[in-house]
Image: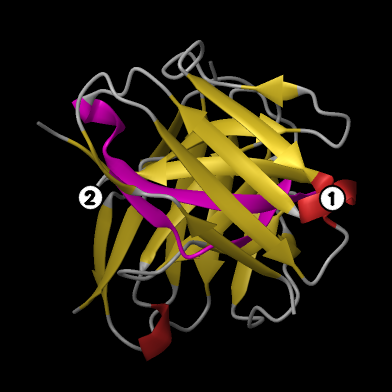
């Protein structure tokens, strides 16, 4: 199975900060990577797919990059509604796996 | 509006069975792969099963042989039959539509608690 790691697991940031989250895969997954945002008590929401394609309706301050084994999610200017947990997911091969998550908290 | 609504969760004893349902609306259900994902309280996301448009099914090792995913296109419904349940299966179970390979949207989830 393909394992995903995320770093950091937790970060504390202020409104307006630029935030970067890294996801690493245990083997190459081409660009078959998605990023999801989850707020407490809510279902995950698709932000980025195919590593760098912004899902319709998602603000342009979110961006994704990478291919192969290393990927990043960047929030260019953190907004109050962005405080949440972010998960990466590989969809290169079954079983599809998720990273452990990165919680973004208010500083 | 695309909508997924899960139901069927509840309290079940270890070794018991439960069947979850996911009612889909707002899209042509038969044209999409569908997935189940679970999340234990305070933990991360774990993909549980998938079913393709042709009825092909996929499972991780943690549930293979115990869980069965199925679909009934005429009723726009997805199911998850869970047998031999364990305490470690306690979680919120989400259904999600597969768009290409990506999961969008997700339902609101249904809680399954395995306890004596």
Residue A79 x %, y %: 42, 88
Residue at 57% x, 55% y: name it. Answer: A35
Viewer-closest of B98 and B4: B4
Furthest-left residue in view?
B116
Question: In the structure shown, which secondary structural element does the residue marked by tag 2 occupy?
Answer: loop
Q: Residue at x 48, y 84 (%)?
A: A77
Viewer-closest of B35 and A15: B35
Based on the displayed image, in which of its 4 quarters is residue B11 positioned?
top left
Where residue B3 appears, x then y in whole percent? 66, 70
Q: Which residue is mark 1?
A: B74
Is B10 left, or right, of B1 in this rendering? left
What colouring method underlies this structural image?
A: secondary structure
Please give the chain letter of the residue carrying mark 2.
B
Q: Is residue B13 above or below residue B113?
A: above
Quadrant of image for the C terminus of chain A: bottom left
| Residue B41 image label | 2
Left or right: residue B30 compared with residue A67: right
Secondary structure character of the magenta stretch overall:
strand
Rendered view: B31 above or below A41: above
Q: Nearer the viewer, mark 1 or mark 2?
A: 1
* Magenta highlight range: B87-112
Disc 1 is placed on an element classified as helix
Q: Chain of mark 1?
A: B
């Amino acid at each position: 199975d393909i394992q995903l790691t995320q770093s950091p697991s937790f970060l504390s940031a202020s409104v307006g900060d630029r935030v970067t989250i890294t996801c690493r895969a245990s083997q190459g997954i081409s660009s078959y990577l998605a990023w999801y945002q989850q707020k407490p008590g809510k279902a995950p929401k698709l932000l980025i797919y195919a590593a760098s394609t912004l899902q319709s309706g998602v603000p342009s301050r979110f961006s994704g990059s990478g291919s192969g084994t290393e990927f990043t999610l960047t929030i260019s200017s953190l907004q109050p509604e962005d405080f949440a947990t972010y998960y990466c997911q590989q969809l290169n091969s079954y079983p599809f796996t998720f990273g452990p998550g990165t919680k973004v908290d208010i500083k | 509006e695309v909508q997924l609504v899960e139901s069927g969760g509840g309290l079940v004893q270890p070794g018991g069975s439960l069947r979850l349902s996911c009612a889909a609306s707002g899209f042509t259900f038969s044209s999409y792969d569908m997935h189940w994902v679970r999340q234990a309280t305070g933990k991360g996301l774990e993909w549980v099963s998938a079913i393709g448009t042709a009825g092909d099914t996929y499972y991780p090792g943690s549930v293979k042989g115990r869980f069965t995913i199925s679909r009934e296109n005429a009723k726009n419904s997805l199911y998850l039959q869970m047998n031999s349940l364990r305490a470690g299966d306690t979680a919120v179970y989400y259904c999600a539509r597969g768009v290409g390979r990506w999961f969008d949207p997700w339902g609101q989830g249904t809680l399954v608690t395995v306890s004596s």
